[in-house]
Image (cartoon, coloured by chain):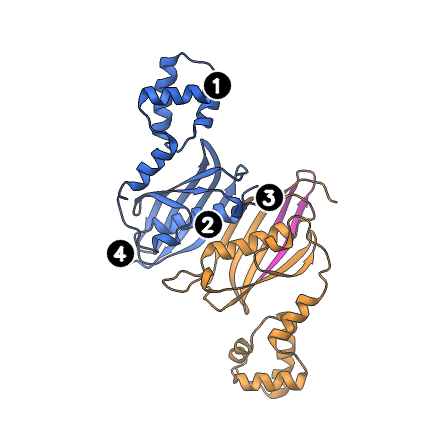
Chain colours: A blue, B orange
Amino acid sequence: MRRNKKERQSLLQETIQHNPFITDEELAEKFSVSIQTIRLDRLELAIPELRERIKNVAERQLDDEVKSLPVDEIIGEMIDLELDRSAISILQIQKEHVFSRNQIARGHHLFAQANSLAVAVINDELALTAKANIRFTRQVHEGERVVAKAKVTHVDSHKGRTRVEVLSYVGNELVFSGEFEMYRSGNEH
Amino acid sequence: MRRNKKERQSLLQETIQHNPFITDEELAEKFSVSIQTIRLDRLELAIPELRERIKNVAERQLDDEVKSLPVDEIIGEMIDLELDRSAISILQIQKEHVFSRNQIARGHHLFAQANSLAVAVINDELALTAKANIRFTRQVHEGERVVAKAKVTHVDSHKGRTRVEVLSYVGNELVFSGEFEMYRSGNEH
């Protein structure tokens, strides 16, 4: 649907606030305008380009520090963390992540991003996956950027179990969802 | 339980037939005897050592050829395949597969072995994972060898869906189980 400029710019601002990792291409498609129009809109609204937006988020101090594993063992780049609450990471799908035959991302890489985020969000020095229930809801292709969002939905410190829901998106499209049940040692340090 | 030699050798033969990838250490523990005793038993029974047994299996022509992906994109070494029926692969857990902190294998590697086996068993040029329900039932450590066994439990060629059950073992212990629901294109070539 075509909108007037004021309407569009207001929605654009809202959309980027809601999903800072959306590309200009995705925005152009969403608002049925050219990429150039989106760029001009961003200039007028003083919204930095995607690369800058990611850098800003990445440079922001994480609210919390990862406890359950060294940060470099997280698959994808972690950009937000509140222990035992929520976490966000970004994985750029590259050649090594896809089937050579059709350039579709292999399931275990999307799983690895989500699973390591579910480990990282746990406020404990030991966190291991007990079970998971996962769905691949849309094929992901080379060049796409997957934003995974983890939410802790239940902590049972008595039993040492934590439930984490992870939803992964390309733009606004859900590509993966998973419910993880995590063991934890019970020692919060 | 201690058994006499004849009993033990008969059970040993049966055990190795059932699980050719069991180590001498695991056998010694199972039968409460020394590793040396197991070696002598194998000599008397003319059962080759583990390394040879694996080589024999690996050199055997696979019954079928993988269709859904190039063999080198399978995680682990595939040693048996009957398309749309069953498949077996072995993954040796090495340093790159474990958490640096505790040498426990990371879940996504066990998942990758099982998931790629579930893809490989499909008799179709396109196979993608729709969903999976998985459990990690025992921690796996660096140096252990994981044998994954996939069984096709249901083919719905009308809907283009196939169900694959994968059970992964270290010795006789179940370490991972998964139910995979796979998409297929429906073109068997």
Q: Amino acid at mark 2?
A: Ala
The secondary structure making up most of the magenta span is strand
Contact flag, marks 3 and 2 (Cβ < 8 Å):
no
The magenta span reads B148-165
Residue density around tag 3, few if under 14, some if 14–19, many if 20 or more, within 10 Å: many
Residue that mark 2 sits on: A112
Query: Is A150 on the left or on the right of B144, as rendered?
Result: left
* Residue depth check, mark 1 versus mark 2: number of the one nearer the observer: 1
Residue that mark 4 sits on: A188
Tag 1 subunit: A
Q: CA distance from mark 3 to mark 2?
A: 17 Å
Q: Amino acid at mark 1?
A: Ser
Task: Identify the disc placed on residue A96.
Answer: none
Q: Nearer the viewer, residue B92 or B82?
A: B92
* Residue depth check, mark 4 versus mark 1: number of the one nearer the observer: 1
Residue density around tag 1, few if under 14, some if 14–19, many if 20 or more, within 10 Å: few
Query: Is A21 on the left or on the right of A32, as rendered?
Result: left
* B32 relative to A137, above or below: below
Query: Is B153 on the left or on the right of A98, as rendered?
Result: right
> Going 48% across and 69% down the picture, which residue do you hit?
B143
Quadrant of the rendering where the C terminus of chain B is positioned: top right
* Residue depth check, mark 1 versus mark 3: number of the one nearer the observer: 1
Residue that mark 3 sits on: B128
Q: Nearer the viewer, residue B38 or A38?
A: A38
Residue that mark 1 sits on: A32
Tag 3 subunit: B
